[in-house]
Image (cartoon, rainbow, N blue to C red):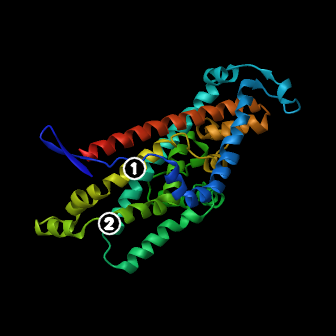
Amino acid sequence: MEETLRNGRTVRKPKKHKKMTWSLVKDQRQLIYMSVPLLAYIVLFAYVPIWGWTMAFQDYKPAKSFSDQKWVGFKHFEFLFKDDSFLQVLRNTLAMSVINLVLGFVTAIILALLLNEIRKVFWKRTVQTISYLPHFLSWIIVTGIVATSLASDGIVNDVLLKLHLIKEPIQWLSEGKYFWGIVGASHVWKEVGWNTIIYLAAMASIDPALYEAAEIDGASRYRKMFHVTLPGIKPTIIILLIMSIGHILEAGFEVQYLLGNGLVVDWSQTVDIFVLKYGLAQGNYSLATAAGIFKTVVSVTMLLFANWIAKRLGEERLL
């Protein structure tokens, strides 16, 4: 690393990358050979299917050949943004995605902080194992447990009735205003333990001398958490948050499809369910493809934005 002086401050410059030359390629040919199968997999399953995007610009009929399809330009995209049902679906997707993102980050960080404070390794491992076991359950099982627990005679209503918090059972899955919260809570219960693993790994790399210095200064355990542990895992939190931005339209499919019903359809449908509904149920493949393209474009845009943020944060870290 080179160091230069700028405005009275020392600035560290990263080393310049080597220029790509034939000799460098020759020296790394083993790595290139190893990457060929992976490259072929990506091309076959990620780029070749993009050819199907042409359906979004056609009135696609499965029985006709490609040359016989009728081209309609951006007709289906215009219909999407004028269709109230798609705008409602987009609202649901964004709302549930943001809820899952916020709840997932907050609960995972809090659980990781609490687990990090457990001194007995046995109890720490036990709690951690119990918390991430639901990750290995399929959504079929999870939604079945959720539906049973939230039934009119389920455990949730029984507890609330015995605590005198409600006077009669609540139909949780029959009222749309509860649906987003139920989806968020289900995601937290299933994934919170698994999401804490990476934060615990980041906490393990924090220099123990920082905790010793804080203890000498009279810091309590909570002070250490806020002034040593959280700043120590701040880069990890930022990176994971940036990576999650690109999946802002990935609110999920299974939980909404399995828990949803006709009574909460205005709150439960996501973009993925919209694509399934129009693409398979009604045979409108062109409209479904247009919705899928919109989702992909938004995801790519958010990934580029996240990459720009990461680059800016990296530059500021060098100053």
Q: Secondary structure at mark 1?
A: helix
Numbered mark located on residue 247 in the image:
none
Count neighbours of disc 1 (C-alpha within 10 A) and say few if under 14, some if 14 to 19, many if 20 or more. some
39 shown above or below 84: below
Nearer-the-camera pick, 77 or 7: 7
- Amino acid type at image mark 2: Ser
Quick check: 318 left or right of 71?
A: left
Q: In the rendered structure, are the residues bearing label 1 and label 2 in contact, judged by CB atoms less than 8 Å apart?
A: no
Q: Nearer the viewer, residue 151 or 66?
A: 66
- Total marks shown come to 2
Quadrant for the C terminus in the image: top left
Res. 140 image quadrant: bottom right
Q: What x and y, as percent, mark residue 276? A: 71, 40
Q: Residue at x 40, y 38 (%)?
A: 308
Q: Nearer the viewer, residue 22 or 224?
A: 22
Q: Position of residue 66 (x, y in %)?
A: 83, 29
The single residue placed furthest to the front in the displayed view is 23
Q: Could you tell me which secondary element the residue under label 2 belongs to?
A: loop
| Percent x, y of residue 222 | 23, 62
- At 21% from the left and 57% from the top, the residue drawn is 227
Residue nearer the viewer, 139 or 72: 72
Going 67% across and 36% down the picture, which residue do you hit?
274
Inter-mark Cα distance, 1 to 2: 16 Å
Is 43 positioned to the left or the right of 179 in the image? right
Of labels 1 and 2, earlier in sequence is: 2
Q: Residue at x 30, y 69 (%)?
A: 117
Q: Is residue 268 left or right of residue 282?
A: left
Q: Tell me if residue 148 can be seen.
A: no
User: In the rendered image, which residue does mark 1 sit on?
Assistant: 239
Q: Find residue 240 and report its horizontal and vertical position in percent.
A: 42, 51
Query: Circle 2 sits on which residue?
Result: 205
